[in-house]
C-alpha cells in the first residue's frame, strides 16, 4: 500500500462515525433557558396564541423585513393557509416544483386544485423559471416556488411570470429562514412566505410549528382569520377556516433559539466553505458534484447536498453507512412520480432535471455544531470509496491528512 494511502486508512480507522444531525449538541447549552421559558408559559396558562407567540411573530417579521408574521401549527398548514388566502380552489392550477417535500403539493390537492409540476435548475435544485413559463395556463391561480436546501429560487424571473399571468406567488421557505436574494429575505419577495419550525430546520422547535409572512395588509388579515376557523369575533364565523394555532410552548422554545439563529447560520456557512476546501484537497471536486453558492446572495445551508454521478449514489451511501456516517436522500422521487399523482399523467422524460437529481443527490452532515475533524472524516470516507482498483489512475490522498483544517474561531458554543 502506498504511504499516503496507508496513512489515510490508519487515520480513518481511528475516528468514529458522524451523525447527519445532532440536536443534542445545540440544545444542551440552552437547557436551563428552555426550562425557564416552558415554566413561564405553564404558570401563565396562556397555552395557545399567547404572548410568546406574539413575540415570535414580531421577531420573525423584523427578521424577514415584512410588516406581518402570523404563527400557525405547522409548515404544512402555512402552505395550506397561504393558498386558502389566495382563493385557490377546485379547478385551479398551482405551479410548483416536483423536486420538493410532499407537503408542498398536498396543500394544493387538499383544496381541490391541481398541482402542475415544473422542472428544476440543475445547479440550485430550485424551480426553473423557463419551465414555469411553459406551464402557465388560463387556469393558473398561483405559483409556488420552493427555496430548497437553504437557497432562494430565482424570484425576479418567477415574479415577472406571475405578474404577467396576474397570479400571486407563495414562497415555500420552510428550509430557508434568513436566506437572501439580492438583499431581500426569503418570505419577503413573494405575496406570502411559508416557514416551518420542524425540529430539523435551521430554526427548529420541540415539535411542529409554522409561520406566514407577508407585506400585504389584506392577506395578513385574512390569514389571521383563517387560522382560527374564520372566527371574528368569538363564535362568529365570516369564512370557513381551519384550526391552525401556534402553541405558546413551541413559541417560547423558538424565542430562546431565535437569538442564536444568525450565529448558527454562520457556522453552517463555515462548514459549507470547509467542505469545498476538503473536497478540493482530496481531489474530489470534479468527481462529486458540489452544491453552488452564489456570493451575491445568502445561502443558509439547511442541507449540504452533493451529486453522485454515474449511478454511484446508493453504493456510496452504503459505504458511508458502514462507517456510521449519516446521510439522507432529499428526494428519491420527484412528486410527479409518486403513486398518488399517477393520474396527473406525467411521463418519463417530462421533467428530466428532476429525474436526474432524484438518482444523484445525497445530503451530508452540515449542522452548526459539526466539527472540522468530523468533516475531515466524511470527506476521507468518500475519498476511500473512490480509490480505484490496482493499476488505475489513483485519486490523490486528502492533503488534510498531513495538514488538518483548523476549526474556525468563534463558531463553538
Image (cartoon, helix red, strand yellow):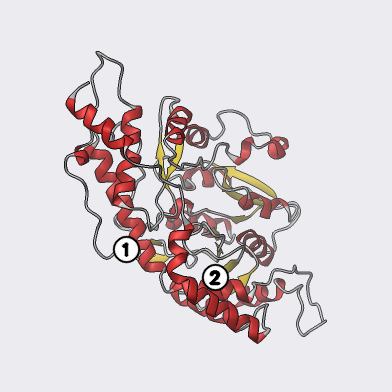
Question: Where is residue 342 shown, x and y percent of the image?
Answer: 70, 35
- State the image quarter where residue 369 is shown: bottom left
**Is 169 left, or right, of 340 in this rendering?**
left
Q: What is the distance, in whole Å, between disc 1 and disc 2 at their CAs?
A: 31 Å
Question: Where is residue 223 shown, x and y percent of the image?
Answer: 65, 72
Q: Which residue is mark 2?
A: 213
Q: Is residue 257 shown above or below 364?
A: below
- State the image quarter where residue 265 is shown: bottom left
**Is 278 left, or right, of 168 in this rendering?**
left
- State the image quarter where residue 299 is shown: bottom left
Q: Which residue is mark 1?
A: 412
**Is 389 left, or right, of 229 in this rendering?**
left
**Mark found first going from the N terminus, 1 or 2:** 2
Residue drawn at x 28%, y 30% as measured from the top left: 9
> Which element carries disc 2, helix, strand or loop?
strand
Question: Where is residue 136 shown, x and y percent of the image?
Answer: 59, 48
Q: Is residue 203 shown above or below 7?
A: below
Amino acid at each position: 500500500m502506498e504511504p499516503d494511502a496507508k496513512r489515510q486508512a490508519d487515520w480513518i480507522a481511528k475516528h468514529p462515525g458522524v451523525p447527519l444531525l445532532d440536536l443534542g449538541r445545540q440544545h444542551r447549552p440552552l437547557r436551563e433557558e428552555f426550562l425557564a421559558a416552558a415554566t413561564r408559559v405553564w404558570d401563565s396558562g396562556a397555552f395557545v396564541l399567547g404572548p410568546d407567540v406574539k413575540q415570535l411573530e414580531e421577531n420573525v417579521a423584523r427578521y424577514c423585513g415584512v410588516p406581518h408574521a402570523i404563527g400557525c401549527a405547522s409548515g404544512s398548514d402555512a402552505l395550506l393557509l397561504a393558498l386558502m388566502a389566495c382563493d385557490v380552489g377546485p379547478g385551479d392550477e398551482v405551479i410548483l416544483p416536483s423536486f420538493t417535500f410532499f407537503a408542498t403539493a398536498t396543500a394544493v390537492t387538499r383544496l381541490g386544485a391541481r398541482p402542475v409540476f415544473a422542472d428544476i435548475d440543475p445547479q440550485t435544485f430550485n424551480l426553473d423559471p423557463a419551465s414555469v413559463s411553459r406551464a402557465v395556463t388560463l387556469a393558473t391561480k398561483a405559483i409556488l416556488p420552493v427555496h430548497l436546501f437553504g437557497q432562494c429560487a430565482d424570484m425576479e424571473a418567477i415574479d415577472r411570470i406571475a405578474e404577467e399571468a396576474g397570479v400571486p406567488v407563495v414562497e415555500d421557505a420552510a428550509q430557508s429562514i434568513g436566506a437572501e436574494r439580492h438583499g431581500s429575505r426569503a418570505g419577503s419577495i413573494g405575496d406570502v412566505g411559508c416557514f416551518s419550525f420542524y425540529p430539523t430546520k435551521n430554526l427548529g422547535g420541540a415539535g411542529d410549528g409554522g409561520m406566514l409572512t407577508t407585506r400585504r395588509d389584506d392577506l395578513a388579515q385574512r390569514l389571521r382569520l383563517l387560522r382560527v376557523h374564520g372566527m371574528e369575533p368569538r363564535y362568529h364565523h365570516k369564512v370557513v377556516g381551519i384550526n391552525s394555532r401556534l402553541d405558546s410552548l413551541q413559541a417560547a422554545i423558538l424565542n430562546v433559539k431565535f437569538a442564536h439563529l444568525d450565529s448558527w447560520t454562520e457556522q453552517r456557512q463555515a462548514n459549507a466553505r470547509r467542505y469545498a476546501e476538503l473536497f478540493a484537497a482530496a481531489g474530489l471536486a470534479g468527481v462529486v458534484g458540489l452544491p453552488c453558492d452564489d456570493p451575491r446572495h445568502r445561502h443558509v445551508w439547511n442541507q449540504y447536498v452533493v451529486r453522485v454521478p454515474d449511478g454511484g449514489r446508493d453504493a456510496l451511501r452504503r459505504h458511508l453507512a458502514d462507517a456510521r456516517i449519516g446521510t439522507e436522500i432529499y428526494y428519491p422521487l420527484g412528486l410527479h412520480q409518486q403513486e398518488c399523482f399517477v393520474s396527473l399523467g406525467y411521463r418519463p422524460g417530462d421533467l428530466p432535471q428532476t429525474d436526474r437529481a432524484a438518482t444523484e443527490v445525497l445530503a451530508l452532515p452540515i449542522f452548526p455544531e459539526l466539527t472540522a475533524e468530523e468533516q475531515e472524516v466524511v470527506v476521507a470516507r468518500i475519498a476511500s470509496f473512490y480509490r480505484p482498483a490496482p493499476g488505475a489512475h489513483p485519486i490523490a490522498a486528502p492533503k488534510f491528512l498531513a495538514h488538518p483544517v483548523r476549526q474556525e474561531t468563534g463558531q463553538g458554543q
